[in-house]
Amino acid sequence: MTRARPGGNGPQGLPGISVTGRRAGTFCLLLIAALCAQATRVQVFQAKELDHNSANQRRTIERYAQPRGDIMVGSEPVTGSEPTGGRYAYKRGYTDGPTYAAVTGFASQAYGTTQLEATEDDVLTGTDGRLAGWSVWDAVSRRQNPGGDVYTTLNRAAQQAAMRGLGDQKGAVAAIEPATGRILALASTPSYDPGAFAGYGADDQAAWNRLQADADEPMLNRALRQTYPPGSTFKVVTAAAALADGVVTDPNAPTDAPYPYVLPGTTTPLVNDTPVCDRAGLSLAEAMTASCNSVLGYLGVRVGLDRMAAIAGDFGFNDAKLDVPVRAARSNFDTRMDDAQLALSSIGQFDTAATPLTMAMVAAGIANDGTVMRPQLVDRLTRSDGTTVQLMRPSVYKRATTPAVAAQVRGLMTDVVEKGTGGSARIAGAVVGGKTGTAQHGVGNSGTPYAWFIAWAAPAGSDAVPPVAVAVVVADSDATDVTGGALAAPIARSVMRAVLGR
């Protein structure tokens, strides 16, 4: 019998490989295959999950490894980036942060992002694919693109006028260019400094905690995210509905509105705030100028719930997805009510509630011949070198009413300023139309009233669409005369003057 020599052929005839060696080699191959399978599973199938795992700091470090792009007002930034010297190389900085906080929101290493800092985060951080030059090479090299810039539609003078006008009062301002929907001012007070907690340190945490504990809620965006009963400013919508549906054919002719007007199905009369309104047969023009509840409540019931709800929706009510691109709170006009509730809703009470943005859309739609443009806060997005990535174009939101009806309502609003409760909004050399509102709220109407004013303004003699429409609400004030005419109209006047350059 012949024996195999050491190092010779094995039983299978393979030279130089023992059974033990083959087994070791097979085991190593299996280990390599398992390693490849695990690497594939981690790098391909679990890549997204691991990439976004909160324990993975790589993306966070990359996020703050370079300056963030800027948010611009006109040609000047209202943001910046500050070197930290720490693990996160840069943190956000703000120029006059409280003035623009309702627009910029905040970008915090500890607490995330809000407002434009959130909606345009990909552009500002440089991760938006549109910012890349040669995207294939960027993907291979993992080169981070410089952050792009966000140009807002704000008018700097109007924004500053809004903040000065609100002062220490709790309230908000929204101003719109009616022909385009561009938002010219968006202010909310009290405000806050977003730079106070932009980092990750103990001071940032302390500043955040103070803001969270503040009973005045300075971080609440009252222009976009808070709704209030609009009071008599809603009568602009009711007047437009009455004219559009033929309930009123001539604003200056007597209506068949009775006095007293008893809410349908009840024994409760709808009271007025002035004795001028306490007679039957007032015209729509007289009722708007004196802000007569009985007449406008009666006309709203005559129009009917379906049509009132429809025209309110055309002006922006009941829209839960109104993005500018920041999401605005839904303004409410109930679609299920009895006639008594409809009468109250038609004068901006009951469950009717609106953001200042929506009420600015009402004024802007009337100014723009009945067409409401979609409100927009961003003008364009650019790369860091200034080249445009996306240009936002005006778009129609809804056609709320006809040009003829809008012209009639503009006449009614002009009378409110020239002869009625809105006299504080007059501007020399300009035509101003407006509507005051003083909305009751609280148990038994015990709360401090909300003072409202909505308006539009145009240079005298101009046939063009008025360049500005505005809504102002003062939600809490120490003033003794808490009315729309006394508190809100002067603020609207200052904002409109800033836009008109007067």
Image (cartoon, rainbow, N blue to C red):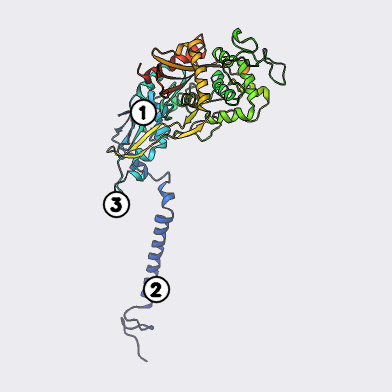
State which quadrant residue 39 falls in: bottom left
Residue closer to the observer: 477 or 366: 366
Cα distance in 3D space between marks 3 and 2: 44 Å
Quadrant the N terminus occupies: bottom left
- Report the side of 173 relative to 248 (left or right): left
User: Which-is-in-front pick, marks 1 and 3?
Assistant: 3
Crowd class of label 3 (few under 14; some 14 to 19; many from 20; radius 10 Å): few
Q: Is residue 167 visible?
A: no
Residue 37 vs 254, above or below: the answer is below
Crowd class of label 2 (few under 14; some 14 to 19; many from 20; radius 10 Å): few
Looking at the image, tell me whether mark 2 or mark 1 is earlier in sequence order.
Answer: 2
The residue that appears at 53% across and 34% down in the rendered structure is 320
The residue that appears at 35% across and 44% down in the rendered structure is 130
State which quadrant residue 430 falls in: top left
Identify residue for label 2: 23
Residue type at mark 1: give it. Gly
Looking at the rendered structure, the secondary structure element under dot 2 is: helix
Looking at the image, tell me whether mark 1 or mark 3 is earlier in sequence order.
Answer: 3
Cα distance in 3D space between marks 1 and 3: 35 Å
Q: Are marks 2 and 1 in contact (CB under 8 Å)?
A: no
Residue type at mark 3: give it. Trp
- Report the side of 467 relative to 132 (left or right): right
- Report the side of 225 relative to 272 (left or right): left
Looking at the image, tell me whether mark 3 or mark 2 is earlier in sequence order.
Answer: 2
The residue that appears at 54% across and 31% down in the rendered structure is 314
Number of the label disc, if any, that sits on residue 137: 3
Looking at the rendered structure, the secondary structure element under dot 1 is: helix
User: Which-is-in-front pick, marks 3 and 2?
Assistant: 3
